[in-house]
Amino acid sequence: MNAPESDRSPNFVEQIVRADQAAEKWDRRVHTRFPPEPNGYLHIGHAKSICLNFGIAAKFQGLCNLRFDDTNPAKEDNEYVESIKEDVRWLGFDWQEREFYASDYFEQLYEWARQLITDRHAFVCELGPDAMREHRGTLTEPGLPSPNRDRPVEENLDLFARMRAGEFPDGSRTLRAKIDMGHPNLNLRDPVMYRILHQTHHRTGDQWCIYPTYDFTHGQSDSIERITHSICTLEFENHRPLYDWYCQSLKIYHPQQIEFARLNLTYTVMSKRRLRDLVTAQHVSGWDDPRMPTISGLRRRGYTPASIRRFCDTIGVAKATSTIDVGVLESSVREDLNSTAPRVMAVQRPLKLVLVDYPSDQVEMMAAVNNPEDPQAGSREVPLSRELYIEQDDFREDPPGKFFRLKPGGEVRLRYAYIIRCEQVIKDEHGEIVELHCTHDPDSRSGMPGAGRRVKGTLHWVSVPHAVSAEVRLYDRLFLREDPDDVSADENYLDHLNPDSLQILSDCRVEPSLAQAQPGDRFQFERLGYYCVDRDSQPQRLVLNRTVSLRDRWAKIQKSQNQRK
RNA sequence: UGGCCCGUGGUGUAAUCGGUAACACACCGGAUUUUGGUUCCGGCAUUCUAGGUUCAAGUCCUAGCGGGCCAGCCA
């Protein structure tokens, strides 16, 4: 069946690690890290990175650290570090006691900066942001050196100390590495190492008013933690020479940076900025809105940790920029939930059905299998009575071809119960169908000798007097475009939001066994899909989110029928 | 017109010293089925192009073409 992780051919990162281990590099140690910036919630793209980093550590008997890359106090917050920890843990990974923060290294970083100044590899620059941009040159033209580039060491040391002491306003000065203003890689054109930011940091408070940049922090943090393989996404490829330059110039332990392609999903935006915009503009209810590709959104939607890990395992890891069909994500939850989710009968859009030949005071308990994929799951009893609800979609007065459900004069099986025949369609004064009158074949009861009789369709149902009311939230893709950013010049991704991405059905009926369902419980509603009890659910007011529908062959047939017309 | 990276089916990812394209999802058929679910079987690729090396090239060489990233005191 599905190949266990060890059977899959190793991705290129694993191949590098394996080769390094075989060559006795790093003393055969393998030590990775997952380095989020706490400026937003984790999304499915981070899950790919988490699975890669923790997965490789596990596979090679190594370790993986959790490290917060918190060098920009203006954007970061403790709310995010808490959510990130929760999400990584929920995904099933454990960093044990190795929870680190780049901000823990600020003092060491400061010393290293002084060392670079002393070695004439860094200088305090007085160019403002605009002037610095002008000096940088362009992709095709070299930059111009800062007028302060050759400032004496002592003066640099003094100025840098005064920057730290808070003597200068934001933006007035920077500490820059002295590399090469003519370098074709713009990252090497005397990059900024420190900037002045009079901002309160979520961990260090007001201890600092200068903060190191990502480039001057990341490699050194890896170095301090004795990371062996520093795995990051492709957009940092151009930064690797700088990563290497800092480690070499500082003469410190030097990990290897390896870049892979970040995850893109169809019909989805993934950047934290866009996700944050969706939240603040209230296009969604929050970071954990079930339509969001965030870990918290997927969790609330009903995705399991195993399904997300499985997804990350099947999409692979490579360097080619690519976009995964969101259907792959959906199929990975179906795969997981198919074997684990208890089956239950629920009617989303009720249509009353009366068994006219069934005694009005009779109730029979019908045995129903909890999960045909899992014999251990056992069975339960579902009450049947004279009045039932079936799905509106399961009856058609004028059915198209291949419609195997209920129609006037037609027969159908009620799952785990009787075969019934539709005798009469009751309508209101507007011609709307309000009720179906049916008769049942008493010999066809499930489990009885006469049950072998075959009919084309089987319907799910709920007994009217025993039904539990519920609200069901149906979710669809948030965007209409496969690539939400594929828009004309005068539009942006928000112009193609799906207006029907959330549909609330407030009049659903579910079988009585669901009365005790708790938030987080997952079920398969037979013939419909997988659902998860939402945290908004109350004992008297059940609320369920549809995680994903079942594969729907009938929907496909209808679609092709419509196309033929 | 600069540097770096990447190009295998509809979408992704494989193919470990060059040996005759595999897996997943999607799609199209069929079987089984008291979920139009699950499961099972079958179908679906001249490996960006053009040359070259070789008995043999997705893998090697050359030249094109196409795509991505980079000009934050963001990460």
Image: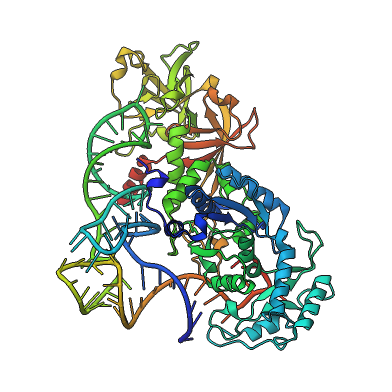
A513 or B3, which lies in front? B3
- In what quadrant of the picture does the N terminus of chain A appear? top left
Task: Name which quarter of the figure residue A433 lies in.
Answer: top left
Colour convention of the picture: rainbow
Residue occupying image coordinates x 47% and y 28%? A345
Q: Is residue A167 left or right of residue A526?
A: right
Q: Is residue A528 above or below residue B64?
A: above
A384 or A433, which lies in front? A384
Residue B62: x %, y % from top left:
31, 81
Residue A478: x %, y % from top left:
53, 53
Does residue A285 show up? no
Q: Is residue A94 left or right of residue A524?
A: right
Residue occupying image coordinates x 44% and y 17%? A366
A282 or A118, which lies in front? A118
Residue A126: x %, y % from top left:
75, 82
Q: Is residue A407 above or below residue A19?
A: above
Count of all numbered marks drawn on residues in the image: 0
Residue A319: x %, y % from top left:
44, 64
Does residue A115 show up? yes
Task: Name which quarter of the figure residue B51 lies in.
Answer: bottom left
Q: Is residue A311 above or below residue B6?
A: above
Task: Name which quarter of the figure residue B39 lies in.
Answer: top left
Q: Is residue A95 above or below residue A515?
A: below
Residue occupying image coordinates x 48% and y 32%? A341
Q: Is residue A10 left or right of residue A516?
A: left
